[in-house]
Image: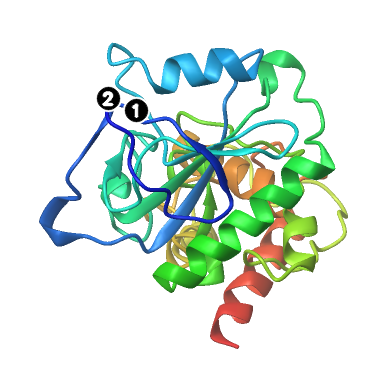
Amino acid sequence: MQDFPADSALVSRVLASPNHGERRAGARPDCIILHYTGLPAFADALRILTDPASEVSSHYLIDEAGAVLQLVAEKRRAWHAGVSSWKGERDVNSASIGIEIVNPGHDGGLPPFPPAQISAVIALVKDVSSRWKIKRERLLAHSDVAPARKRDPGERFPWDRLAQSKVGHWVEPAPIQGEALFASAQEGPPIRALQAMLSLYGYGVELTGVMDKPTERVLTAFQRHFRPERVDGRADASTLATLHALVAALGA
């Protein structure tokens, strides 16, 4: 494996992964996907992300102390998003930069992300976004683009801290009041309207008009990112109000 010049001055070391390819159909990065590694330690993550047998990689890996490693050149297609979609794009790998953040994840108790690590995430996202002209609302969680499969970086990731540094798209979540407005399997135009709003924001959800399992998984992903105080996949008033505020903020 031959190293390559780092794309960012923030990179402390380049360690080339063999797991990458051409971006398809001339695609360029227009979004950034944040992941947690979901493994006990940095060394475990680095081994997996550079092992040809794993067929997994990311452009960047940020350790607990905030050191930034680059594994795949930004012009190349890293293999981090898997089966995913956002705003109708189903080859998210070709359209994105992937950043893995060392954290054992839900299976490891989802410990807090250290401040130095979050500072490094903020600096790197700003740098990548500036060079590729990536909009703030195109900073996404892995769970946003793959809600049926993924939970990372999880509800303890401090998206609000990023927003304080003008990184990512964020509104203050509406206070939690009351219970779910719709029961599981309930049907009707209001549910279709909710699905349409989620789809308008970017989530891959079918407009079935039914509060089905796929819709509940998308709501769970939305809550992990934007209303993390209660993550249950239920459409309560707080979730709907937060979603409406986010869509309105896009227009502004």
Q: Which residue is mark 2?
A: 1
Q: Is residue 182 visible?
A: yes
Q: Percent from the top left, x then y, of residue 251?
A: 55, 85
Is 85 located above or below residue 165 in the figure?
A: above
Q: Percent from the top left, x then y, of residue 100?
A: 54, 36
Q: Percent from the top left, x then y, of residue 37?
A: 57, 26
Q: Amino acid at mark 2?
A: Met
Circle 2/circle 1 CB separation < 8 Å:
yes
Q: Nearer the viewer, residue 232 or 35?
A: 35
The colour scheme used to paint the residues is rainbow
* Mark 2 or 1, nearer chain start: 2
Crowd around label 2: few <14 · some 14–19 · many ≥20 (10 Å)? few
Q: Percent from the top left, x then y, of residue 185?
A: 52, 38
Res. 143 mark: none
Q: Residue at x 48, y 38 (%)?
A: 147
Q: Is residue 138 visible?
A: no
Q: Quadrant of residue 237?
A: bottom right
User: Judging from the image, what secondary structure is the residue with disc 1 in?
Assistant: loop
Q: Quadrant of the C terminus?
A: bottom right
Q: Residue at x 66, y 31 (%)?
A: 63
Q: Quadrant of the N terminus?
A: top left
Q: Amino acid at mark 1?
A: Ser
User: Judging from the image, what secondary structure is the residue with disc 2 in?
Assistant: loop
Q: Which residue is mark 1?
A: 17
Q: Residue at x 27, y 44 (%)?
A: 77
Q: Quadrant of residue 232?
A: top right
Is 54 located above or below residue 130 in the figure?
A: above
Number of numbered discs: 2
